[in-house]
Image: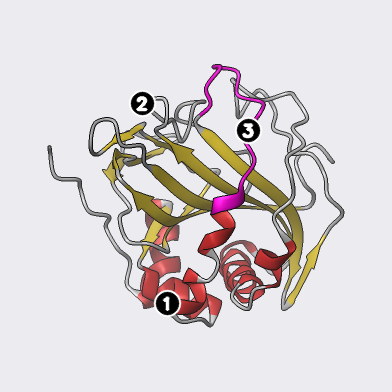
């Protein structure tokens, strides 16, 4: 099997400079721990929340490979406020496969949101967003995903290479178990440059400027034939002004 390309990790002091210069930054788990004011064990305490995700009943390709939960927040400086549960919506301009439809997923479990690292992580990422585009309230959609290989292949991004219609996207790898594939690809939206790499370290992070970058993840397959595996991620989207569909 071909060895994966390792991510071009950003130094802790240069994350925002890298986002300004190239539109994205890949961040090791140690920096994510700093954002969340948490140790490795604290972050691992969140991981059981991915073992109780309902199936995604909206997949238009007929697949059974995705499970998820979804909740929404407003992050304004140090204030992190969960908003009443609401449907996820994207326009067809950004999601040709599942756009234009209201998708109501089960909310993220209260125990996950109450865990000590959750709010500090959102505050820390909110500070990055405000440093890049000015201090303001950020409308955050949080998605827990599990992509599995029970049927032989799982597609992290069935819509293909895309933008999300927000200001910033944070993709956190929670874990990989018994899989191969799942390569991350990021491309300039208005230029020729792109990079490919595979996030392997649990709790490492891809942070990108959604207006400038297109992204996707390639399908996953079992590392050992006949033995199902899965890939867990936490995706956080950050949008100024309003949630998608409200403006």
Earlier residue among tags 1 and 2: 1
Secondary structure beneath dot 2 equals loop
| Residue 201, placed above or below residue 93 | below
Frontmost of labels 2 and 3 is 2
Earlier residue among tags 2 and 3: 3
Label 3 crowd bin: few (<14), some (14–19), many (20+), radius 10 Å:
some
All told, the count of numbered labels is 3
Q: Which residue is mark 3?
A: 56
Q: Give residue 220's quadrant in the image.
A: top left
The spot of residue 228 in percent (x, y) is: 36, 37
Q: Which residue is mark 1?
A: 40
- The Cα–Cα distance between marks 1 and 3, rounded to whole angstroms, is 29 Å
Q: Quadrant of the C terminus?
A: top right
Determine contact: label 2, label 3, CB under 8 Å. Answer: no
User: Left or right: where does residue 31 sit relative to residue 11?
Assistant: right
In magenta segment, residue 59: yes
Q: Along the line of sight, which residue is nearer the eye, 2 or 108?
A: 108
**Magenta stretch bounds:** 51-64
User: Left or right: where does residue 241 sit relative to residue 216?
Assistant: right
The spot of residue 217 in percent (x, y) is: 39, 37
Q: Which residue is found at the position 62% from the left and 61% from the top?
A: 133
Magenta segment, prevailing SS (helix, strand or loop): loop
């Amino acid at each position: 099997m071909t060895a994966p390309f390792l991510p071009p990790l950003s130094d802790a002091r240069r994350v925002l400079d890298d986002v300004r210069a190239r539109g994205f930054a890949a961040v090791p788990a140690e920096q994510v721990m700093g954002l969340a004011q948490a140790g490795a064990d604290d972050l691992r305490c969140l991981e059981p929340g991915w073992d109780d995700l309902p199936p995604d009943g909206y997949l238009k390709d007929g697949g059974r490979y995705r499970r998820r939960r979804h909740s929404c927040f407003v992050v304004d400086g140090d204030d992190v406020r969960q908003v009443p549960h609401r449907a996820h919506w994207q326009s067809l301009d950004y999601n040709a496969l599942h756009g234009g439809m209201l998708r109501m997923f089960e909310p993220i479990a209260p125990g996950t949101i109450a865990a000590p690292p959750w709010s500090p992580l959102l505050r820390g990422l909110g500070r990055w967003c405000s440093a890049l585009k000015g201090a303001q309230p950020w409308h955050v959609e949080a998605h827990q995903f599990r992509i599995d290989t029970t049927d032989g292949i799982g597609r992290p991004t069935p819509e293909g290479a895309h933008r999300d219609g927000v200001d910033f996207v944070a993709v956190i790898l929670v874990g990989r178990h018994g899989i191969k594939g799942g390569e991350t690809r990021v491309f300039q939206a208005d230029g020729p440059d792109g990079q490919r790499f595979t996030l392997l370290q649990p709790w490492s992070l891809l942070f990108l400027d959604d207006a400038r970058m297109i992204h996707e993840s390639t399908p996953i397959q079992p590392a050992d034939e006949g033995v199902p595996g899965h890939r867990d991620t936490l995706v956080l989207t950050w949008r100024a002004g309003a949630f998608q569909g409200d403006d």
